[in-house]
């Protein structure tokens, strides 16, 4: 276990280095100059050059790269020219809102998804199964952006039940979290359904039944536990996509998260903020994937965290 | 100079996030609950007003990188004071300045400051503060600096400030009306997260890009505002912003797209009003490209588009056909003979000029998504006579770089005239030296230089009229539409005055129970 963790940590660091490098390269080679954007169309060539110099953009790329790597290693992500303060500070301020949104959406997706999965998977091929499958397919197909706007029109405008935009109170969280959870709910439902359907036919389930266990305890004690493994794996991997979705959803609902910050930072070529945000996100993905692996090992002793010898 | 109106560039961001995907590890609350407060001190008794414009307030530093963003200007007008503000064509009102004058060639500008004005922390506003603020702009790393290249500033005494231009600059008042005076501060970073100013409101809390909360400044030199608190919210998505207005979460919004306005009008709780703005749809044609070098060709292309019909269907609320490159609310406006839609004449003129229909594809660049439908309509009219035009959407940073490099055949922008003065539009963009359009005409240069170097208003109007005639007849660009600035507010709001540049003031507003 320790060996495994050390190895995973090393891979994690390597991944972060890769992300830092990739973002650095992409952002430097993307057309559109930071100094030009900052100074606008009326600046003289001299002014642009002066700003490029003070931002260090006139140094050779490799020099910029290594000095940046050094700074990142020292946890210094630089100053956001747009916000006039440390980039990581701006990012960390927005981070909790995105975490709240993403986690809430995940919880909703897990509960709703598993519920649907159990309903459908218990009797594969039944009318209920087909109804649920069609429904989840529909959920996967609708664009979250559109759903978000529909939710606003129905729940905020028509029924005046929930606020239409902004952050701050739990009420503000409901619409964006539900919207964000929709494709994820469908995914969890479909995966757990096939896992459950498959397990229902396995010999150990027959055995459990023949022991005289009730259908409920067969389901919770044997079927669910085994069919959860692929769900956990997928949740771990999909949390990444969830943040991609959060960018759009945060914009629709004016949710004060990382997504909207990242969008405007890219537009403004605010390199420091883009880099700080992507490193933080990468870090989270690595931690989440590791967590998913550990949870899986707990669920299924056949999955071993030791390296093969 | 125009305010930068930006929309999020979701596509690019999506790519980036997909690249470096993902989610969360800790918990917390980042924002205070928005809502009414009433600690009721001060003379303010006008309640809480919540407004949401189209552009987020990301930065409160009126001298820095975001200084010309509509969001920053909006906040600055609430928090700081200007020397002068422009109120219409060639008209200015003093804020910190009680009076001002220029020398004959408009190269030296002298301002006398109002006495007794204080920042909200009680320190007096002095000429030294004005000088320090201006020097901060000059040294600054923001778009305002480009307006004042080569300028010097001096404070001969406590209440006098003198600006000296390197060459005559009749548009100085227009430009300086985007300049705000802040206290002299050492540590900028911290200061501008909750800056002290001499404007009508004082910052209570600020979350960049999200919410700015301000309260009435009891010591405001022009009288304490009636409002107790004012909250600026950012709601980028139009449907959400319109809903928030209808539900009363927001009291005032502006710059709504045309397709939303009719619906807002139907709501009896709302007042909708549009005011003429300095904005003009401006479609430059790059005369340095061989295919567009001939004025007859440019003119013919203009003639081939039925702008009247397009405007009527796409901008029924906010568009009127234009008859000049600057709007009627701008000093230097001179109406021209409208270009009549006549596709047959256009085709004949292109044939005669030897236009190469086969091998010419005109790349027409733009960055703002709200132009898309308009541009597609124009392109399809041009396709009718066999001219191939390709609207090309570029991300803001790329657009700007290409714009300055003249890396386009046609360019689409809404261009305004800062300070309602043609000098900041025609005088700034159309000279050979500026090299912004690919068009160079010595006669025009002379007219624009003359108009920019006299403070005689009648003479300037005459010179701009001559310049406008050349620009119009040479079809430097197509100028199809004057833009109106729409506002909508709840009927509980009183005393709100829509302003034409889309950056409203709120210190005279009150709200009653809704």
Image: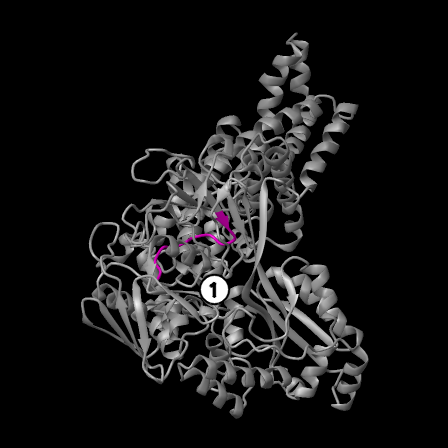
Q: Position of residue A302 (x, y in %)?
A: 53, 29
Q: Which residue is mark 1?
A: B3
Q: Give the residue furthest to the top.
A: A212
Q: Position of residue B461 (x, y in %)?
A: 50, 80
Q: Give the residue furthest to the right.
A: B344
Q: Is residue B54 magenta?
A: yes
Number of numbered discs: 1
Within-10-Å neighbours for mark 1: few <14, some 14–19, many 20+: many
Residue A128, compared with residue A165, is above or below; it is above
Q: Is residue A126 left or right of residue A77?
A: right
Residue B327, compared with residue B180, is above or below; it is below
Q: Is residue A82 magenta?
A: no
Report the magenta residues as a range: B52-62
Residue B53, compared with residue A215, is above or below; it is below
Q: Give the residue furthest to the left.
A: B157
Viewer can see residue B287: yes
């Amino acid at each position: 276990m320790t060996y495994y963790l050390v190895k995973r940590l090393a891979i994690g660091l390597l991944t972060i280095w890769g992300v830092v490098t990739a973002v650095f390269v992409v952002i430097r080679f993307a057309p559109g100059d930071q100094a030009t954007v900052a100074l606008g169309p009326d600046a003289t060539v001299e002014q642009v050059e002066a700003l490029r110099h003070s931002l260090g953009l006139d140094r050779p790329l490799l020099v910029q790269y290594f000095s940046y790597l050094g700074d990142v290693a020292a946890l210094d992500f630089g100053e956001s020219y747009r916000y006039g303060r440390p980039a990581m500070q701006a990012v960390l301020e927005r981070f909790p809102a995105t975490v709240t949104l993403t986690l809430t959406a995940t919880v909703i997706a897990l509960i709703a998804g598993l519920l649907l999965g159990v309903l459908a998977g218990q009797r594969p091929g039944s009318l209920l199964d087909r109804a649920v499958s069609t429904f989840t397919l529909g959920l996967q197909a609708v664009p979250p952006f559109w759903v978000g706007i529909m939710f606003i029109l129905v729940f905020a405008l028509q029924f005046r039940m929930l606020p239409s935009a902004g952050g701050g109170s739990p009420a503000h969280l409901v619409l964006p979290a539900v919207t964000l959870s929709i494709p994820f709910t469908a995914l969890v439902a479909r995966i757990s359904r096939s896992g459950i359907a498959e397990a229902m036919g396995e010999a150990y389930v027959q055995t459990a039944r023949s022991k005289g266990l009730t259908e409920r305890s067969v389901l919770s004690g044997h079927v669910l536990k085994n069919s959860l493994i692929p769900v956990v794996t997928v949740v771990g991997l999909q949390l990444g996509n969830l943040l991609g979705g959060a960018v759009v959803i945060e914009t629709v609902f004016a949710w004060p998260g990382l997504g909207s910050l990242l969008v405007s930072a890219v537009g403004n070529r605010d390199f420091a903020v883009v880099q700080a945000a992507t490193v933080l996100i990468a870090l989270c993905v690595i931690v989440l994937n590791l967590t998913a692996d550990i949870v899986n090992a707990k669920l299924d002793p056949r999955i071993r965290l030791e390296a093969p010898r | 100079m125009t305010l930068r109106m930006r929309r999020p560039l979701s596509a690019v961001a999506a790519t980036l996030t997909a690249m470096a995907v993902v989610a969360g590890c800790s918990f917390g609350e980042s924002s205070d609950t928005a809502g009414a407060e009433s600690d009721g001190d001060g003379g303010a008794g006008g309640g809480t007003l919540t407004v949401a414009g189209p552009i987020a307030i990301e930065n409160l530093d009126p001298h820095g990188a975001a200084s010309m963003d509509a969001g920053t200007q909006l906040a600055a007008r609430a928090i700081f004071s200007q020397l002068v503000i422009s109120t219409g064509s060639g008209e200015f009102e003093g804020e910190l300045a009680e009076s001002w004058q220029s020398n004959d060639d408009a190269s030296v500008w002298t301002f006398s400051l109002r006495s007794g004005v204080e920042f909200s922390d009680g320190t007096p506003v002095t000429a030294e503060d004005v000088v320090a603020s201006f020097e901060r702009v000059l040294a600054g790393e923001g778009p305002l600096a480009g307006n004042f290249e080569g300028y010097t500033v001096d404070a001969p005494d406590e209440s006098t400030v003198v600006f000296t231009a390197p060459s005559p600059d009749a548009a100085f008042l227009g430009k300086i009306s985007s300049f705000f005076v802040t206290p002299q501060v050492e540590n900028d970073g911290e200061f501008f997260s909750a800056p002290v100013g001499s404007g009508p409101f004082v910052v209570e809390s600020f979350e960049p890009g999200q919410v700015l909360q301000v309260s009435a400044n009891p010591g405001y030199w022009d009288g304490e505002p009636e409002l107790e608190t004012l909250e600026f919210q950012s709601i980028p998505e139009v449907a959400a912003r319109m809903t928030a207005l209808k539900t009363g979460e927001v009291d005032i919004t502006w710059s709504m797209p045309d397709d939303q306005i009719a619906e807002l009008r139907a709501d009896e709780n709302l007042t909708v009003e549009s005011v003429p703005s300095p904005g003009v749809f401006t479609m430059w044609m790059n005369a340095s490209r061989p295919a567009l070098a001939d004025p007859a060709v440019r003119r013919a292309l203009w003639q081939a588009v039925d702008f009247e019909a397009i405007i009527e269907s796409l901008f029924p609320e906010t568009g009127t056909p234009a008859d000049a490159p600057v709007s009627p609310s701008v000093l230097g406006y001179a109406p021209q003979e409208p270009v009549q839609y006549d596709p047959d004449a256009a085709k004949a003129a292109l044939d005669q000029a030897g236009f190469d229909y086969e091998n010419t594809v005109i790349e027409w660049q733009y960055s703002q998504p709200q132009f898309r439908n308009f541009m597609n309509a124009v392109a399809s009219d041009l396709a009718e006579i066999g001219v191939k035009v390709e609207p090309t959407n570029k991300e803001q940073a790329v657009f700007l770089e290409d714009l300055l490099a003249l890396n386009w055949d046609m360019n689409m922008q809404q261009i305004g005239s800062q300070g309602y003065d043609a000098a900041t539009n025609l005088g700034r963009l159309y000279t050979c030296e500026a090299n912004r359009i690919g068009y160079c005409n010595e006669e025009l240069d002379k007219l624009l230089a003359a108009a920019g170097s006299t403070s005689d208003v009648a003479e300037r109007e005459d010179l701009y009229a001559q310049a406008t005639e050349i620009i119009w007849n040479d079809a430097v660009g197509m100028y199809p539409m004057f833009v109106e600035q729409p506002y909508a507010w709840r009927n509980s709001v009183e005393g709100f005055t829509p302003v034409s540049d889309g950056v409203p003031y709120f210190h005279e507003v009150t709200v009653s129970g809704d």
